[in-house]
Image (cartoon, coloured by chain):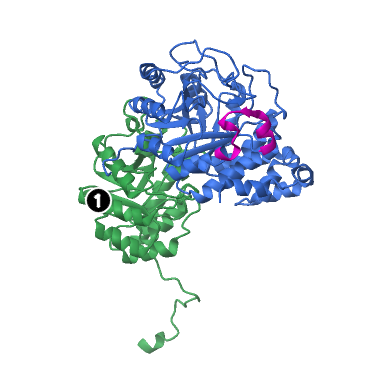
Chain colours: A blue, B green
């Protein structure tokens, strides 16, 4: 049984009616509990909880400080290829968009890596567009070999792979996997993913579990908030994380709450995710999954990020470019527009002045252990 | 040095071991060390970056401290062994705190993998201090594997819940045949004092100091509590009775 079977059952929940049924008492009951269940999660994502964000925030902050202290881990994404075979209605990299595609040579990867590493960052998230032909596992592996010289932790965000392929990458030194489901609502998923292998909902949904099985140390999941009702999407994401955490206790499961951002096309999201909604989502994630990492990207504006770091966030991107080769040149097309363009030193200083410690390195690559 | 704690060929006058994680900035660490009086400090090797002077934890730890690199992040004995070797190769000495954790929710240690790692590392000359669930059979195996001490948890890491495993820890203190250092869970100075009163050789804590409103004040509070608890243990606590005992015995006349 995979999470897909659980999702089929969870989809039967009459969300639209249910949200209105939760009351202040339900929210307070959830807040008073130490270990929250599915009902509590629903209550914390309901409109009733929207009136109690301050109480939720106080508890979320307390839990975060206890488990993570004042540390916030920094990383940056590195785009190495933007070739994509999918037609997704909300993404610049979609195959239907006509722009000069790029794929870095290994020399360019090295230059990019050196530029990023010079900022002090030791955690990198390697990204490609979704194309097995243009950025196959072998290419990702070659890139990893280069990145290992510069970084102590390498995560990937690429098209879903088989367990064997993930294992191959884990053996090569990749320790983390990020894979966004984009939309958990199946009907909307079919609508938004017009063409390409990404149309296969289940292949994508089960990929994080394959990553856990392959032995990645951390797996980061998320829904692209705005593509469907945010309350339901946040609920499904948290249930997915909880499913993975229960079955793979050795793997650190993290959540990302990315909001839809402008891109090359003209798609407009169905559900408006306000700042208040984003805060409610982050707080519900933290209260339901006290030890999970919560990642905040530069999709959010600087002023908001400065506030959100106090509410449960444990990982942040810094010094970001969403263009292929964007750290050494400026010729690429961004996957989406970022909101917080601050440099690594600027993010570092912001964290220090907020009473938080930026952590540049929090892992050592253990692949190719001499024990083998 | 009276009442020193002897571990790995070192005589330690402080029985308070501290950690380096969770602080708002590394620059607080030297003063926390000074105020706590601690002589042993644990460092997650995964956080050490020798190439970054400013952000490197090691550059904030005074020379006289005994470094206790830990294998935080290891999920198997093999990973722990590799981390320990990396730490030694990085010049962090030959002390190591084994942490093998396969449970990201409660961060409870895997005793079996910990024993395996201890066997390998002790044979390589490391001074091994394993973090463990308080289980007597596991403690025996760790002792036989060459551990220099055992470090049972009082409660899950970072929970500040205190000595939830008190009964089991006191059995270890009585039976294990090597120093017992209570690690994890201690949230209050009174709990550190209680562990020391029970006969623990030392306590290791991090969250309680690092997340206090005033970490420096809390470091000092723990210093006093650990010293008081140790002194009480050495002085010998009076017996606990269910009923009041008359200070003038009822049968005293028989001795007249």
Residue at figure coordinates x 42%, y 40% from the top left:
A164
Residue at figure coordinates x 65%, y 37% from the top left:
A281
- Disc 1 packing (10 Å; few <14; some 14–19; many ≥20): some
Residue lying furthest bottom: B254
Q: Main secondary structure of the magenta part?
A: helix
Residue at figure coordinates x 52%, y 44% from the top left:
A291
Measured along the vertical axis of the image, is residue B138 above or below residue A98?
below
Residue at figure coordinates x 20%, y 48% from the top left:
B125
Q: Position of residue B108 (x, y in %)?
A: 44, 52
Residue holding disc 1: B120
Residue B25 seen in the figure: no
On whether residue A32 falls in the magenta region, the answer is: no
Magenta span covers which residues?
Answer: A185-203
Residue A294 seen in the figure: yes
Locate residue B181 relative to residue A234 in the image: left or right.
left
Q: Quadrant of the C terminus of chain A?
A: top left
Secondary structure beneath dot 1 equals: helix
Locate residue B174 relative to residue A257 in the image: left or right.
left
Residue A358 or residue A15, whichever sits in front = A15
Q: How many marks?
A: 1
For disc 1, the chain is: B
Locate residue B160 relative to residue A116 in the image: left or right.
right
Q: Position of residue B176 (x, y in %)?
A: 31, 63
Q: Position of residue B186 (x, y in %)?
A: 45, 51
Residue B242 or residue B112, whichever sits in front = B112
Q: Position of residue B97 (x, y in %)?
A: 32, 47
Measured along the vertical axis of the image, is residue B157 above or below residue B135?
above
């Amino acid at each position: 049984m995979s999470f897909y079977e659980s999702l089929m059952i969870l989809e039967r929940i009459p969300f639209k009616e249910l949200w209105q049924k939760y009351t202040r008492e339900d929210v307070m009951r959830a807040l008073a509990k130490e270990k929250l269940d599915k009902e509590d999660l629903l209550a914390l994502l309901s409109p009733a909880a929207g009136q109690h964000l301050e109480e939720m925030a106080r508890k979320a902050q307390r839990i975060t400080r206890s488990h993570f202290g004042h540390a916030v881990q920094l990383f940056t994404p590195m785009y190495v290829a933007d070739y994509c075979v999918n037609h997704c209605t909300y993404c610049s990299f979609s195959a239907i968009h006509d722009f000069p595609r790029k794929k870095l040579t290994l020399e360019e990867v090295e230059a990019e890596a050196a530029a990023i590493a010079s900022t002090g960052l030791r955690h990198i998230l390697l990204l490609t567009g979704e194309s097995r032909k243009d950025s196959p596992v072998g290419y990702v592996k070659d890139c990893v070999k280069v990145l290992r010289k510069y970084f102590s932790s390498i995560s990937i965000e690429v098209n879903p792979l088989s367990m064997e392929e993930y294992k191959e990458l884990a053996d090569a030194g990749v320790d983390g996997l990020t894979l966004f489901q984009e939309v958990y609502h199946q009907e909307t998923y079919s609508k938004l993913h017009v063409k390409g292998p990404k149309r296969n909902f289940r292949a994508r949904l089960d990929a994080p579990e394959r990553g856990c099985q392959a032995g990645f140390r951390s797996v980061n999941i998320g829904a692209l908030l705005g593509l469907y009702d945010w309350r339901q999407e946040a609920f499904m994401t948290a249930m997915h994380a909880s499913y993975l955490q229960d079955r793979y206790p050795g793997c650190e499961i993290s959540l990302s709450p990315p909001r839809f951002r402008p891109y090359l096309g003209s798609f407009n999201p169905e559900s408006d995710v306000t700042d208040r909604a984003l805060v409610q989502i982050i707080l519900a994630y933290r209260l339901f999954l006290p030890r999970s990492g919560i990642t905040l990207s530069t999709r959010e504006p600087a002023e908001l990020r400065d506030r959100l770091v106090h509410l449960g966030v444990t990982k942040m991107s810094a010094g970001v470019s969403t263009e292929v080769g964007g750290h050494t040149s400026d010729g690429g097309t961004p996957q989406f527009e970022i909101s917080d363009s601050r440099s690594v030193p600027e993010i570092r200083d912001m964290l220090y002045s907020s009473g938080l410690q930026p952590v540049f390195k929090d892992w050592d690559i253990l692949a190719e252990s001499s024990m083998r | 040095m009276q009442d020193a704690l002897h571990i790995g060929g070192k005589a330690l006058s402080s029985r308070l071991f501290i950690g380096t994680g969770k602080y708002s900035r590394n620059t607080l660490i030297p003063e926390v060390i000074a105020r706590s009086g601690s002589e042993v400090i644990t460092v997650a090797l995964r956080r050490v970056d020798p190439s970054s002077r400013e952000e490197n934890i090691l550059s904030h730890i005074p020379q006289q401290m005994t470094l206790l690199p830990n294998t935080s992040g290891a999920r198997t004995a093999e990973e722990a062994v590799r981390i320990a070797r990396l730490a030694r190769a990085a010049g962090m000495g030959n002390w190591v705190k084994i942490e093998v954790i396969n449970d990201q929710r409660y961060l409870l240690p895997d005793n079996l993998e910990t024993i395996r790692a201890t066997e390998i590392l002790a044979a390589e000359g490391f001074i091994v201090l394993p973090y463990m669930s308080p289980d007597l059979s596991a403690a025996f195996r760790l002792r036989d594997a060459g551990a220099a001490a055992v470090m049972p948890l009082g409660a899950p890491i970072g929970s500040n819940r205190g000595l939830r495993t008190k009964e089991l820890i006191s059995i270890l203190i009585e039976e294990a045949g090597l120093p017992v250092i209570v690690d994890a869970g201690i949230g209050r100075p009174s709990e550190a004092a209680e562990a020391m009163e029970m006969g623990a050789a030392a306590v290791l804590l991090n969250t309680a100091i690092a997340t206090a409103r005033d970490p420096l004040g809390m470091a000092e509070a723990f210093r006093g509590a650990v010293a008081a608890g140790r002194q009480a243990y050495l002085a010998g606590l009076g017996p606990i009775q269910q009923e009041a005992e008359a200070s003038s015995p009822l049968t005293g006349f028989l001795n007249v």
